[in-house]
Image: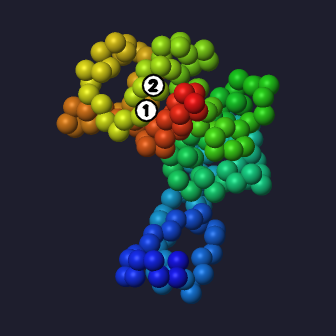
Amino acid sequence: MAGTLLPGAAMVVTSQPCLALPSVIFQHHVLLLGLAEDTDDYVCCFFPGCEEPVAAVARHLKAPLGLAGLCFVPLYCHMLCSVLDRWWQDALPVPAPTTVTEVYAAYVAALLGPQPAPQLWAQLLALAGRILFAKAELRGVPGSSPLRCLLAPKDNGAVEFFHPTVQEFVAAVFAIATL
């Protein structure tokens, strides 16, 4: 960060919005707007007319676990609300997720269903190692397959995961499973 390795190069550092970065090191600061103050509004919209889950989700997000910082990014806020909704509505006997890994695992599990077939996991893990793939590679996957919830078509006819972070999580699961 002292600028000696690559003189003249620029570096972009991202952090949670509440973290104060020293101005001695960083000459320029840019604030990317997300849901910093609108998290409560988003949670209320996610659970319309349901005060109990709104209060439970808000308490969980504001607990000193670091999840509230993730809500700055709208996708994470959606994932957290989706996961916590399932946890709250199903009265799951396990504690609500408190780490990013637990949130991703619960989110992917919720999309794939309670007991996904082994071939569904095999297809998902095979696709996770690549950035794009052709629609033809999904011919054996039924249109109603939960796998399709994780994928998004592109204009050029290719298919990709709907968000790179979900793909990275699935690829990490694949890497661990194949070690």
Q: Residue at x 64, y 40 (%)?
A: 101
Q: Residue 128 carries which label?
A: 1
Q: Nearer the viewer, residue 52 or 8?
A: 8
* Foreground residue among 13 and 173: 173
Residue lying at 53% horizontally and 77% vertically, measured from the top left: 1
User: Given the image, on which type of amino acid does mark 2 rest?
Assistant: Leu
Residue 124 image label? 2
Q: How crowded is mark 1: few (under 14 residues within 10 Å), some or many (20 or more)?
A: many
Quarter of the image with the C terminus is top right
Q: Position of residue 146 (x, y in %)?
A: 47, 20
**Residue farthest along the bottom direction in this orientation:** 24
Residue 136 shown left or right of residue 27 in the figure: left
Q: Which mark is residue 30?
A: none
* Image label count: 2
Q: Residue at x 61, y 18 (%)?
A: 114
Whether residues under marks 1 and 2 lie with C-beta atoms below 8 angstroms apart, the answer is yes
Q: What element carries label 1?
A: helix
